[in-house]
Amino acid sequence: MKHHSRSSWLAILLTGVLGMPPGVFAAESSSSAAPAAMQVTVAGKVQRASGIEVTRITSLHYRPQVTGYGQVMDLTPLLTLRAQLQAAEAALSAAQQEYLRLKGLNRHGQNISAKRLQATRAVWQSARAQVAMLRVRALQHWGNTLTRWLEGRGNPGLDGLVDGRRQLLRISASQASYQMKPPAHIEISAGSRATLVSVSPRVNPEIQAPTYFYLAESAMPVGFQFTAGFPISEKVFTGVQIPGDAVIWYAGAAWVYVRTSATEFERRLITTEYPEEGGWFVPAGVHPGEQLVTQGAELLFADEFSGHSSGGGGG
């Protein structure tokens, strides 16, 4: 740009030499109001020399969501409980059969003492109580669905967990007030897709938020932590995604520049209500097909603020 004010050169120095993030200088350098026109004219050759870059943005469908925090679970407690349940159920079956055998012999006049019959009944009742206790433990820790898997009734996913083809994930919504139905499928940050198993009977103790079990066919290590999105609205918005590097902050608000012609740029106010990875989803203010300034927005702001647009020829 041919003529820069002191503010312009400070912006360039702080951004390029000292490594300050885009927009910091713009937000803090002056309390004066920005120009009402919010437009800058910059010749094409000056754009190239200044490193100003634009990207034509595309349409994006977005459903508002909160972040879920997940972890790959250690299966040892689950499989240990399964083994205990199987052993207890086997013991219960054996004790019941023995009690019923002796009871039948006693009924037919065989030499079975009442004391022996009573002792056998006590063993049977103790075995039944042991199975009931383990079931309660399973329900409290794992919920109805996984308990049925442990008991061998309707367990399509358990074999995959045992042989390592699937992994069990525990994911918590980041809001304690989350009341939406959890998504049947989610994309997790590790690049895998997970399928809902059930609601966990336990909340996340740190944030008191609801927790869910998911199954994933992946090879993530036990204890691996990841994030996932949980929808908070049935409504789907259409808009664009704005990368963080395109945003400058001024007067407590977020702004971007859009190139409206070969040499003209316009500053637009955007909302940051919907954060996305690496930026924000914006439903209004910037439209699909427009050319968004993704590098050099702070230089345009400094030039607009100084009142010296760098025209003087195209190309």
Image (tube, helix red, strand yellow):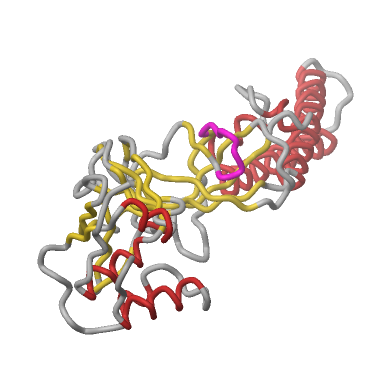
Q: Is residue 189 visible?
A: yes
Residue 76: image location, x then y, percent: 77, 45
Q: Which residues are magenta?
A: 189-196
Is residue 25 shown in magenta?
Answer: no
Residue 127 versus residue 137 in the image, above or below = above
Residue sitting at x 75%, y 39%: 79
Q: Nearer the viewer, residue 187 or 166?
A: 187
Q: Residue furthest left?
A: 36
Question: Which image quarter holds the N terminus?
Answer: bottom left
Residue 311: image location, x then y, percent: 24, 59
Q: Residue furthest front?
A: 313
Q: Nearer the viewer, residue 239 or 303?
A: 303
Residue 25 lies left or right of residue 150; in this view the side is: left
Residue 299 lies left or right of residue 124; in this view the side is: left
Residue sitting at x 33%, y 47%: 315
Residue sitting at x 49%, y 55%: 203
Residue 83: image location, x then y, percent: 79, 37
How many circles with numbers are drawn on the protein? 0
Residue 315 versus residue 185 in the image, above or below = below
Residue 282: image location, x then y, percent: 27, 49
Residue sitting at x 71%, y 32%: 161
Residue 156 lies left or right of residue 281; in this view the side is: right
Q: Residue furthest right?
A: 111
Q: Is residue 178 visible?
A: no
